[in-house]
Image (cartoon, rainbow, N blue to C red):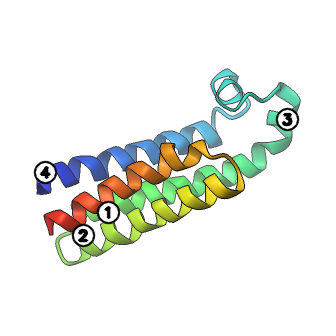
Amino acid sequence: MEIVANVLVGLVAALHAYILVLEMFLWQRAPGRRFHGFDTELAATTAPLAANQGLYNGFLAAGLVWGLIASDPTGFAAQVFFLSCVVVAGVYGAVTANPRILYAQGVPGAVALAAVLIAR
């Protein structure tokens, strides 16, 4: 089960690294605009906000990678903390911005968190 948990944590980290790239570097380009349905003007106006969000997603990814490479108990604690942050961010994003955030971010984080706790 530990291998499954580690793979799931790695996938959540990869997801947040992808979100970092999308929000910090591709926001005003076709992939970012298409993903959110923004026109060029709205993408340009919201780019600083998106870059800030992307940076925070990068911190989540970095924390999850740290949790994977650190020895226990630090690795376990980092995984639980950062996956909990992912779940909270997913729920908050779903309530305040777009319900699909719950499924794109919150559910994968919750599944990975459950796997980490079960593997322990």
> Which residue does the numbered mark 2 point to in the structure image?
75
> Looking at the image, do the residues carrying marks 1 and 2 touch, with CB atoms under 8 Å apart?
yes
Taking depth in this image into account, of 47 and 1 the one nearest to the observer is 1
**Alpha-carbon span between mark 2 and mark 3:** 40 Å
> Which residue does the numbered mark 4 point to in the structure image?
3
> Looking at the image, do the residues carrying marks 3 and 1 touch, with CB atoms under 8 Å apart?
no
**Alpha-carbon span between mark 3 and mark 1:** 35 Å
63 vs 51: above or below: below
Taking depth in this image into account, of 37 and 20 the one nearest to the observer is 37
**Alpha-carbon span between mark 2 and mark 4:** 14 Å
> Which residue does the numbered mark 1 point to in the structure image?
66
Is residue 40 rendered to the left or right of residue 2?
right
Residue 90, position as x, y percentages in the image: 54, 56
Taking depth in this image into account, of 46 and 35 the one nearest to the observer is 35
Q: Secondary structure at mark 3?
A: helix
Residue 20, position as x, y percentages in the image: 55, 45
> Which residue does the numbered mark 3 point to in the structure image?
42
**Alpha-carbon span between mark 1 and mark 4:** 16 Å
- In the picture, residue 47 is in which quadrant? top right
Is residue 15 rendered to the left or right of residue 8?
right
Is residue 112 rendered to the left or right of residue 119?
right
Tell me which amino acid carries mark 3.
Leu
**Alpha-carbon span between mark 3 and mark 4:** 42 Å
**Alpha-carbon span between mark 1 and mark 2:** 7 Å
